[in-house]
Amino acid sequence: MMKFLIVDDEKDVEMLFLQKFRKEIRSGAIELVFAFSGQEALNILNDTKPPDVVYVFSDINMPGMSGFELLTKIKKDFPDIKVSMISAYGDNDNYNRAIESGAKEFFTKPLDFNTLKQEITDIIDNQY
Amino acid sequence: MIKKDRIFTNQDLLLEAMLNKDESTLRKLIHPEASVFGSAIHELEKGIENVLHYYTEAFALLPDDRKVNIKSRRFTDLKNQALVEQEFEIHFMLEGKEITLLTLRQTALWTRAEGAFDDEYSWLLLHDHTSMPDHLGAFETISLNELLEGNLDLEFETENLKKKLNKSIANLKIAQDQLVQKEKLASIGQLTAGIAHEIKNPLNFVNNFSEVILELIEEAREEILSQKSKVKSDSERSGEPRSEKESPFEGGAGAKAEAGDDAEPDVASNPAPLLTILDDIEANLHKIHEHGKRADSIVKSMLLLSRGKSGKPVPTNLNAILDEYTKLAYHGMRAADSSFNVEIKTDFDRQIPLIKLIPQDISRAFLNIINNAMYAADDFAKTHSERNPSIHISTSLHDENAVIRIKDNGAGIPDGIRDKIFQPFFTTKPTGAGTGLGLSMSYDIVKMHNGALKIESEPEQFTEFIITLPLNKPEKI
C-alpha cells in the first residue's frame, strides 16, 4: 500500500480523485490523503515520523502558501518524497520553476487522469 | 423738486435708458433738435433720430450685465438751461469679478421744455458730448461705423472661437471615453489570466467527473451482465425457469447462497453495487452541473466588465460579488507574477440583504480597490521580509448602510498624496503598471451609487478603503 497526498484548495478534488482511483483504492494498491492548503499538507507530513506519504501531488495556485513554497519546503525537509505539480498555468515559466525546484512532473489542468494514472502505476511497479 | 435734483434724476434716467436701449424713455428725454458729439462719433449727430441711433447702437456693443458708476458730477444753473458735467465708469461682471470697461466724461446740456409741468419730462437733453479722458489715450475719434464693424468682426471671431471650443470639448469627451474604455480593457487584461485559471478549475471537474460517469456506466453494465450470467448459471443449476430470474434486482436467497465462488459473493442477488454506482453517477452529475454554472458565472462577469455601457441597478448579493472579484483579482495577479502571494482573510456579514447596485460598475470598483490592496501588500513585503503580505476584506451593516472594508498591510499612503489618489491619472505604480484611472473611476462609481469612499492609512502599517453603500436608495441611481 502506497500513500499519496493530494494538495488543492478545491475541495471537490477529493471526490474526483477517490472515484478516479476507486479500483486502485479498492484493490489496496494505493491510499489517497487530501490537504486543502500547503500548511495542512505539511501538518500531514509531520504527523508520522518518518512520513508514510511517498508522493505528493500539489496545486500551485492556492491562497496562503503556494504550491512552489510547499515544494521547496518538502524537498528541504523530506528529500525522499516525490512531488509533482498540478496547475492551470501550463506556461514555460511555471514549468521550469517547478522542475528546477525539484518537482518530478508537471501536470496541467484540466487534468488528464490517464497520464496521472500512468505516473502512479509506474511508481507502484518500480516499488515492487 | 428743486431744479438740480430734477436734472440729476433726468441724467440718471438717460444713462439707464441708454444702457437698457429703452427707446421710448429716451424719446421722452431728448429734445427734437438735440445733438451729440464724442469719441464714438466722427461728426456731430443732429436731430432726435440720429441721437437715438447713436445711443442705442453705441451701447449695444457693451456686454449685457453692465452697470454704471458715477465718479463725479457737477451742476451749472443757466436759468432755462442747465449744464451737467460728470465722469462715470461702465463696469461688467466677468466670472464674478467686476471689470471696468470704460471711463467716460460727459457734458450734457439740458433745456426746459416749453409749457411742461414740473415732472421728469419738463427738462430735455439738448446736447451731449461724451468722450474718453485724454489721459486714457483716446485722442482719436472713433466712428460709430468703425465700432460696429469692429463689433461684427468680434462677433465673427467669437463665433469661430465658440465652434473651436465646442470641437475641442467634443474631442476631449471622445478621448476621455476612450481612456475609460482603455482602463476597462486594461482591467480585463489583468483579469484574463485570472479568468482562464478560474474557468480551468470548473472545467477540470466537468471533464473529469463526466469521464468518471462513463467509467461508472461501463462498470454498471459489467455488473448487470455478470449478474445476468450468474442468474443464468444459477437457474441452469437449480433448474428453475429462467424468466423469473431475468432481473438482477430479483435475485432470491438461493442465488445469493450459491454465488460463493465470486470475489464479491453478494453481487448476483444484491442490487447494492448497482445502487452505489447510481449514487455516484448522480453525485457526479450534481458536481458537473455546479461547476458548469460556476464557469458560466465567471464568463458572465467577464462579459459584464467588458461591456462599454453602464447597466441597470438590480438587487445584488454584495458578499458574493466581493468574494468572486477577490478570487479573480488574486488569480489575475498570480498569473501575471508567479512570485506574487498574499494571504486573504474575508469576514462577510451574512445579514446584508440584496442591495440595488449596477453589478458591472460596482464590481469594477471593488476589483480596482482589491487589486491595489493586493499590489500594495505584496510590494511592501518584497522589501520587508518580516512582513507577511495580507489583505482583509469585510462587510458589515451600519444603520441603513452596508460598509465594505478592504485593508492591506502595505506601505500605507503618505499624508501628502492622500488627497491626490482619487485624481484621474495619478498613480504611484511604475510607468506602465497603472493607468492612474482605477481609483478615480472607483470613486465615481461609488458616488453614483450614493455611497461614500474613505481612506484610512498609517505609513508602513496599513491602508484601509471604506466603502459605504446605502441599503435603500435605489431610486436615485
Image: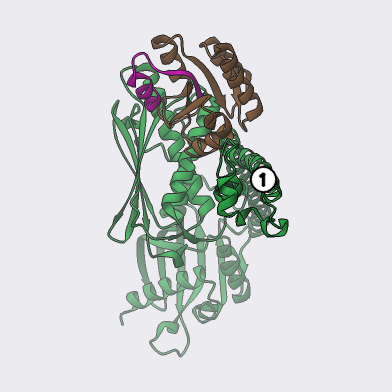
Chain colours: A brown, B green
Q: Which residue is mark 1?
A: B230
Give the residue type that dot 1 points to.
Answer: Lys
Is residue B49 magenta-colored? no
Secondary element type, mark 1 = helix
- Above or below, B51 relative to B158: below
Q: Nearer the viewer, residue A60 or B53?
A: A60
Is residue A55 magenta-colored? yes
Q: Residue A104: x and y, percent?
A: 56, 14
Left or right of B227, for residue A69: left
Left or right of B196, for residue B331: left
Residue in view at x 59 percent, y 71 percent:
B51
Residue in view at x 46 percent, y 34 percent:
A9
* Crowd class of label 1 (few under 14; some 14 to 19; many from 20; radius 10 Å): many
Q: Residue B340: x and y, percent?
A: 46, 24
Residue B449, by quadrant, is: bottom left
Which chain is mark 1 on? B
Q: Is residue B291 visible?
A: no
Left or right of A88, for residue B343: left
Q: Nearer the viewer, residue B323 or B470?
A: B323
Q: Nearer the viewer, residue A58 or A91?
A: A58
Q: Nearer the viewer, residue B307 or B197?
A: B197
- Above or below, A111 relative to B397: above
Q: Residue B225: x and y, percent?
A: 70, 45
Q: Residue A91: x and y, percent?
A: 63, 22
Q: Which residues are magenta?
A: A39-59
Q: Is residue B223 visible?
A: yes
> What is the number of callouts on the image?
1
Quadrant of the frame with the C terminus of chain A: top right
